[in-house]
Amino acid sequence: MKKAKIKFTPEHNWVELKRKVAAIGITDYLIGELGDLIDLCLPKVGEELIYGISYGEIESINILHDLIAPLSGEIVKVNSDLSTSLKVLQKDPYGESWFIKVRLEETEIIDSLMDEDEYDEYIKSIKKKTKEAGKKKKKVEVKKTAEKETENTAEDKKVAKKKTVTKSKKK
């Protein structure tokens, strides 16, 4: 599947619309963030998918991640093969690695989703924020360490002064 044909959500879902049926999966970015996958739990055919509500879970060695519905509709197909072959999903999260197919009442929501270029920019902004947060955290840690050293030095001086005073009194 060419990524140019699909749309993306801030929750790292991809959506491909064919007529009034949308295939939904997760992006390679999310898979990379999750790490080694160990389990996938998907809904059943006939269930209602509700926008913004969890429709399943994907589990990695480090985290259990809720799959958030990017749209609403009736689930008409579930890719149950993925549960037994998560390595396929990790190698190529697009194309045949869709999770569910949903019949939509209205397709307008698709227009509000990001195209590939917009999603790429979104990922860049996430990485930049993460990098900046890491730098801020390092600065805070360095500052705290410096403050602690200053406190320790001040405390050492107080102790040394006390010892000197005590020795002076003994003489």
Image (cartoon, rainbow, N blue to C red):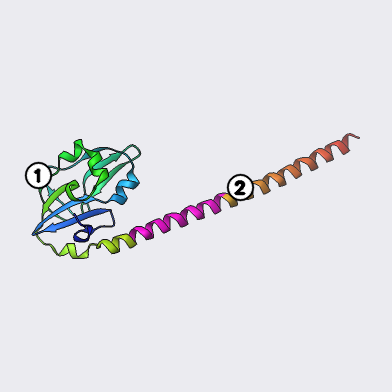
**x, y percentage for residue 138?**
53, 51
**x, y percentage for residue 154?**
72, 47
Q: Secondary structure at mark 2?
A: helix
**x, y percentage for residue 46?**
8, 46
Q: Residue at x 42, y 58 (%)?
A: 129
Q: Residue at x 59, y 52 (%)?
A: 143
Q: Pointer 1: residues within 10 angstroms few (<14), some, or many (20+)?
A: some
Task: Tell me the kind of residue under disc 2.
Answer: Thr
Q: CA distance from mark 1 to mark 2?
A: 56 Å
Q: Which residues are magenta?
A: 122-141
The image quadrant that residue 38 belongs to is top left
Q: Which residue is mark 2?
A: 145
**x, y percentage for residue 20?**
8, 58
Q: Which residue is mark 1?
A: 45
Q: Nearer the viewer, residue 169 or 115?
A: 115
**Could you tell me what secondary structure mostly forms the magenta stretch?**
helix
